[in-house]
Image: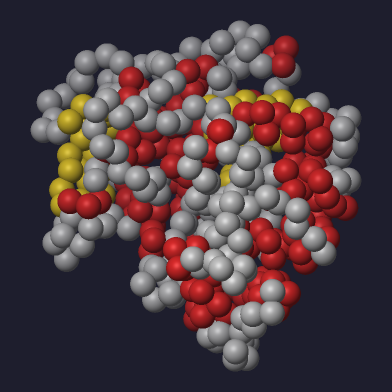
Amino acid sequence: MTTHRYAYHYVTDGAASTPHAGHLLNDRLFRARGSAIERNLSPAPPPPVWAQDLLRIAKAAYLADKLSRRDRAPDRWTREIDLSIQLVEPDRWRNRAEPLLVALLETLTADRWEIRFRPGAVGHRGVPGWLFDDVPAEEVALFSGGLDSTAYAAERVGTAGGPLLLVSYYDPALKHRQEELLDAVRRLGSRPLMHRAVLLQSRANGVRLEPSSRSRGLLFLSTAVYAAAAHLASRVAVPENGQLAVNPPLTPARVAACSTRSVHPRTLHLVNQLIETVGGTVEVVNPLLFDTKGEVCRRALDAGLPPATLMATVSCGHPPRNYSASRFDHCGHCYPCLVRQSGLLAASGRDATPYERDVWAPTAGKNDVGHRDALRAWLGRGFGIREVTTDVPLPPQADASALLRTLLRGRKELNDLFARHHMPGSTGTPAA
């Protein structure tokens, strides 16, 4: 297949230490100035160098991803990206880590990557007293303000232990909502709760950025790993229900990165292999992998969150335009919105979320029902082990049978959603 080739060299704020035939990338291309991402996550002392370099790699890959337009490729998707990255300890990453990183990026983006590591980066210094009177966090988890991460936080804040650190992607439109959800979570237990939001957006600087951002999940995850390593926490939780973690394609045209793979078991397996290979001690886990959306909602209710708080979470994959000025938080027609509806109805029997579009209305337009109709067709086809593993293979030791049972239960919740609106979903018997 013919691809479109891009070449970049990521450096720290200093000058490049080695010549490289490509565009220079650095942290000034992020909206957060300088190393604000690191400063917002690190107590004193700073994390080990491997965690610093992992975050540099994730930032470099994200910038290269956003600056490389897919519409210039012959197939309008597949790119060839040549990326050189300045690190503090490049030798630690060469050889064994390189193929793992390439496999990880190709799983996430469906592009072809060539990665090289260069010396010259400068290690970070700690920021004394930055976090919670220097009391280290015992546990770290990602928190988006969605149903899954809110449910997990609600469970964990009610357990005994040291401080729980939640790491979020900063979105001005979501800031107030996240704070309301965190207040609701805090009321459920006495465990200390810390929250850090990091701004990961890149600057346009007059350049048309690639609208897809398949590598953003790796950047988000690497920020949490950075924080966990700084706090000497042994793991990072990435809460995502099994339906959306596996995210099987609804149609034959949706393959590879056309369906998000940020929390797929293979992705997390490769991240953990990468960390272990460079001597890291943090493990990334998905504690909700074997739960459907409805089961996650029930866990949130059992943890003490009221139904109104569940409705206040934000799960949309395509937020309405003019989001900050809109009374709608959810488009109502994307796949995550439909899974959300099925989960809330399965757990509580109602969904009071205000959706911008009602895909179940007889007057719903053609542009509103594309995901609904694709989902309905998917529910009408058989689904078995082959469908779980064909698009993206599962890692070794994965419990494919348990994962299949989770996805079949999720399909049942989705079928019930269609039946509730007098629109049968599955027309066939699911494969076992």
- Residue at the farthest bottom position: 428
- Residue 223 location (% of width, % of height): 52, 32
Q: For residue 375, what is the image quadrant?
A: bottom right
- Residue 97 location (% of width, % of height): 36, 45
Relative to residue 364, is residue 23 depicted above or below?
Answer: above
In depth, the one of 254 and 278 nearer the eye is 254
Question: What residue lies at 64% left-to-right and 83% top-to-bottom?
Answer: 424
Relative to residue 201, is residue 156 depicted above or below?
Answer: below
In depth, the one of 180 and 382 nearer the eye is 180
Question: What residue lies at 82% left-to-right and 64% top-to-bottom?
Answer: 349
Identify the image quadrant of the N terminus.
bottom left
Q: For residue 127, what is the image quadrant?
A: top right
Q: Is residue 302 left or right of residue 198?
A: right
Question: What residue lies at 54% left-to-right and 13% top-to-bottom?
Answer: 126
Question: What residue lies at 69% left-to-right and 56% top-to-bottom?
Answer: 288
- Residue 200 location (% of width, % of height): 46, 31
Q: Is residue 311 left or right of residue 391?
A: right
What is the basis of the colouring in this image?
Answer: secondary structure
Inspect this view and state whether residue 254 appears: yes
Relative to residue 44, is residue 324 depicted above or below?
Answer: below
- Residue 71 location (% of width, % of height): 22, 52
Inspect this view and state whether residue 398 appears: no
Identify the image quadrant of the C terminus.
bottom right
- Residue at the farthest front position: 363
Q: How many marks?
A: 0
- Residue at the farthest top position: 128
In depth, the one of 35 and 53 nearer the eye is 35
